[in-house]
Amino acid sequence: MFRRRAATAPSTERHDGPMVKAAGVYKRYGPLEIIRGVDFEVQRGEVSVIIGPSGSGKTTFLRCINHLEKIDAGRIHVDGKTVGYREVDGRLHELRDAEVCRNREQIGMVFQNFNLFPHKNVLENIIEAPRGVRKIPAAQAKARAYELLERVGLSDKVRAYPAQLSGGQKQRIAIARALAMDPKLMLFDEPTSALDPELVGEVLSVMKQLARDGMTMVVVTHEMGFAQDVADTVTFMSDGKVVEQGPAPEVLSNPEEERTRAFLARAMSERRASA
């Protein structure tokens, strides 16, 4: 397990409770329940990994954390605030789009398929949100972009366009772009699933360094090696429910639930076969 630095929030405001707290969360698409009563917490500076079979609701729940998906019941708080809603007399009232965007400013998200702007070069991709959303001066935004490109090992790609980059390079640029907003929380949705196997390591290396630096992270992944090396807590989801959660060594090495044991056995077998 990594030795981490103490996490620091970019804002002077600080909530003393968990960075993420979800209680009784439900999400439906028509009659189909995708998330069914999920409870979930992440402390500051923790790396929390969510695992489970395809279709278990992992990605949907991750998107609910920053209100990319609207919940149908329950509560989700990030740093003590309800993202996407205002609570009045015990009832939730959805915020306007502009207010939701302000809520999301300090929640970075990295997607499976990079989501870079193809018509903008690397520098332009990274400074887009700081300039457009936070109104940071151009010189300051560019200086921060150069720092982040150095951090992810791609300082030589500042003028390159996404079509000129490998998948691993695109994902590292996507991480740099998310970090440019100085988030207090980073969400990763299967960040290596679209990569060729030989490119996975370069992305995981950047994520491991973020963990060492104390970044609070929620990671949906199928990379069991990453979970073993970096995770503080692991949550196993199946059929839209949390089946098991706890400290990473306990869940990964000695799971209590049969479904968790069966999933991990398959995952480890596939990992050995691909090694």
Image (cartoon, grey):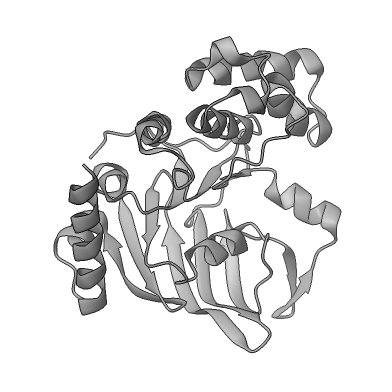
Nearer to me, 155 or 272? 272
Q: Tell me residue 271's x, y (percent).
A: 23, 50
Q: Is residue 168 left or right of residue 102?
A: left
Nearer to me, 64 or 269? 269
Q: Vertically, is 113 above or below 140?
A: below
Nearer to me, 243 or 173? 173
Q: Vertically, is 116 above or below 43?
A: above
Nearer to me, 246 or 237? 237
Q: Is residue 212 visible?
A: no
Name the residue at 64% across, 43% down.
106
Q: Tell me residue 205's x, y (percent).
A: 37, 30
Q: Tell me residue 147's x, y (percent).
A: 57, 15
Name the residue at 33% across, 34% down.
4
Q: Is residue 67 left or right of residue 187?
A: right
Q: Is residue 145 left or right of residue 169?
A: right
* Quadrant that contains the N terminus: top left
Name the residue at 38% across, 67% down.
53
Asked which quadrant contains residue 89, the reply is bottom right
Q: Vertically, is 274 above or below 93?
A: above
Name the residue at 63% across, 56% down.
66
Q: Is residue 246 left or right of residue 54?
A: left
In the orientation shown, which residue stands out farthest toward the top? 156
How many numbered discs? 0
* Quadrant that contains the C terminus: top left
In the orientation shown, which residue stands out farthest toward the bottom? 31
Q: Is residue 127 visible?
A: yes
Q: Tell me residue 100's x, y (percent).
A: 77, 56
